[in-house]
Image: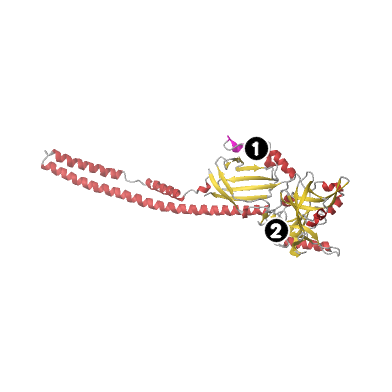
Amino acid sequence: MRHLLSLFAAFLVLLAPGSIRADPADIDAAARGVVRVVIIGEEDDELFPVSHGTGFAVSGDTVVTNAHVVRDAMHDKDMDIGIVSSGGGEAVYGQLIAVSGRNDLALIRITGDLRLPPLAIAGGMPPDSGEVTSVGYPMNVDRAQGLSISDIFRSQPPVKSRGFVSGARPSRQFDTILHTAPIARGNSGGPLVDSCGRVVGVNSFGADNDGGDAEFFFAVSNRELIPFLRANEIEPRINNTTCRSMADLDQAERERMQREQIAAREDLAERSEAQRARRDRALLEAEQAVITDREDRVFLSFVLLLVAFGLGQWALALWNKDPRDDKKLRIVGGATAVVVLVALAAYLTRPGLDEIDRRVAAAMQDGDDDAGGGEAGEPGDLALLCRLVPERSRITSADVKDVEFDWTADGCVNTRTQYGFSGGTWSRVFVPDDEDAVSVNSFDPDRRIFRTERYLLPRTEMNEAREARGKFEAPKCGSENAAAQLGELQSEVLGRMPQQANERLVYECNARN
């Protein structure tokens, strides 16, 4: 009956509006920073585990867990704290640096050669009925697997169990989150994460289930965790963005592109209509102007011919009066000839009907020049400042800042980083040594959109990506055929990436003042 009620409750939660299914890739990415915290005793030079719990990284070398997990090490100075990561490698020691018994939190500094990817912390409280996942090392799973004591020190992936938030309430004088994501002994100190893999609380204890009631569990909320970290000079990586799946983001992007295409078609139709109207006006004005010019030239020719006729009559009169007066006769006769020639030239040079088409074309060209071309769409050398567009982005753990982006037409960024060109896209792959994340940056110079796809990889896959990246040296800016060469060289690294990235950061870039 209890299982039936649990299934029914889960069904109702799935129907609730606004619920988001957890992305396994996000939970796996968060699990990279989850560790087993082992309290170690020593007898006859032999190390043995006294107890263990779970912790998670809040910086590269700092782990949060519950205070009760490290209680034995606090009271017995002969006991040590061991940190066993989930990504492979040997166990290392940790040093207890802060304990808060009031809200059951403790902070451990890693003293060995181990660096962990810190988990992002959700800036707000999870919604009621929102999906959450507990990540940790429950002892009952260890026993079910038949693990030996020595196996506790061996790197293993943590267990993930899914449930739902049942509310936020104060318990034991501190703020907690009530949820149904199962935990057991050994889960203490592990993270409770939301659908995007961001920490919403630190799992601490469970409700008494001796009477057969439904099982509920408690996590120390972020309202306790964040002040605790800051009081101990740890600035947490807080993420306040809305948790959305990559599928939802892709769908929103498709809808946005459809809206842009519709708007572009409507704009083109409006431009075509405006262009037709402008052409009609230009045609009417050109017809009127040409007809007026033709009439003016014909009228001028007629007037000049009348003047020439008058001058001819005067010349004839001079001839009849005194044919020997050659000088005056030549002057009047010459003037008559000149006026006749001017009249003939005015008539012959009157604009033809084809002048209408030429004037219309000139008017349309002048209108296009006045409208401008919009420099934003012209690729070339650009000095830009790129700002994140939150509604087009998905952020789980990235540290987001504005990006100064100086671009040249041959794909050089900030005078030092060459981008490759392949498949119509400018891109650059970054595989850092100090972070377990591969970033694929791309830039569209026509639309001035800068984009980063981040893949949060397990240690093994990250090492494979580093190996593939180490096989080539990226060409420097200005090298011959650098863009095409780099576009081909990056293909092996890109081929090793999962089908879908964990994070997408989309920036709009504008001219930098």
Outermost residue toward the top in this view: 480
Magenta part of the protein: which range?
Answer: 479-486
Depth order, front residue of 295/22:
22
Res. 65 visible in picture: yes
Quadrant where the image shows the N terminus: bottom right
**Kind of residue at badge 1:** Leu
Q: Quadrant of residue 422?
A: top right
Label 2: state its secondary structure. helix
* Percent position of residue 378, x then y: 52, 45
In this picture, is 407 found above or below 132?
above
Q: Crowding at label 1, few (<14), some or many (≥20) Cα neighbours within 10 Å?
A: some
Depth order, front residue of 164/512:
512
Depth order, front residue of 53/88:
53
Q: Are marks 1 and 2 in contact (CB under 8 Å)?
A: no
The answer to whether residue 482 is magenta is: yes
Q: Is residue 300 left or right of residue 32?
A: left
- Residue in the picture at 59% in, 40% down: 416
Marks 1/2: CA distance? 46 Å
Q: Is residue 305 left or right of residue 188?
A: left
In this picture, is 354 found above or below 15?
above
Dot in front, 1 or 2: 2
Q: Is residue 387 left or right of residue 16?
A: left
The answer to whether residue 65 is magenta is: no
Q: Which residue is mark 2?
A: 227
Q: Crowding at label 2, few (<14), some or many (≥20) Cα neighbours within 10 Å?
A: some
Which circle marks residue 240 in the picture? none
Which circle marks residue 489 in the picture? 1
- Say whether disc 1 or disc 2 marks the residue closer to the N-terminus: 2
* Percent position of residue 297, x then y: 29, 48
* Percent position of residue 58, x then y: 72, 52
- Residue in the picture at 56% in, 43% down: 407
